[in-house]
Image (cartoon, rainbow, N blue to C red):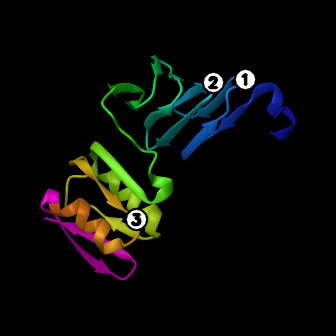
Amino acid sequence: DASTWSEHRLVELEGEAFFEVEKGERFTVKTPLGNVEVLGTSFNVYARNNQLNVYCRTGKVKVQTTNDSTILTPDQSVVYTNNEKQKKNKLVKRDGWNKGSYTYNESPLEQVMGDIQRNFAISIDLQSVNPQTKFTGEFNAKDLDTALSEVLWPLNLKFEKQGNRIVISK
């Protein structure tokens, strides 16, 4: 609400956003999965499918969930899945997406394919493969075929285009 912005400095988020906050008063990003408080920093927040991933590029952020509180400094990240801390300090750098570059470190295939779906406005069928298969690497979002190859080739998976739908298989 713009009328209370100066008093509360609160943004509600479901999805993903990158923020650059000038030094000054406290700023809070509230997600259904936890809150991120900052003071003069740049950071990325991903809050989808019961996963909260916060990456601090500069400054310092505090991530607060129901069960945990974590302080992040530059180039640190934290991942919570179903409100349980999965990892901290193991870099999960998600701030390149707004420039078309997506980077992953042991991320589930369903998350990676979700990013491809949203970026290219297509539908992806993962029924023939394990959606929890871990992927470490990156893809560039300029070309769909290249992006799919960059993710699927290292996992020994194939894809088939069926109109606006992509079917992933072994």
Magenta stretch bounds: 154-170
Which badge, 2 or 3, comes first in the chain's sequence? 2
Residue contact at pointers 1 and 2, CB within 8 angstroms: yes
Direction bottom: furthest residue: 163
Q: Is residue 47 magenta?
A: no
Image coordinates for residue 69, horizontal then vertical, percent: 48, 16
Q: Is residue 47 left or right of residue 5?
A: left
The quadrant of the picture occupied by the N terminus is top right
Amino acid type, residue under disc 2 in the picture: Leu
Q: Position of residue 3 (x, y in %)?
A: 87, 36
Q: Earlier in the sequence, mark 3 or mark 1?
A: 1
Crowd around label 3: few <14 · some 14–19 · many ≥20 (10 Å): many
Res. 39 mark = 2
Residue 51 in view in this figure? yes
Amino acid type assigned to the residue bearing label 1 in the image: Glu
Can residue 14 be seen here? no
Q: Residue at x 57, y 35 (%)?
A: 31
Q: CA distance from mark 1 to mark 2?
A: 7 Å
Few, some or many residues within 10 Å of mark 1 (<14, 14–19, 20+): few
Give 33 or 127, whichever is nearer the viewer. 33
Q: Contact (CB < 8 A) between labels 3 and 1?
A: no
Q: Determine which of the numbered discs, if any, sits on residue 141 in the image.
A: 3
* Residue hosting label 1: 25
Residue located at (72% from left, 24% from top): 24
Instruction: Say whether disc 1 or disc 2 marks the residue closer to the N-terminus.
Output: 1
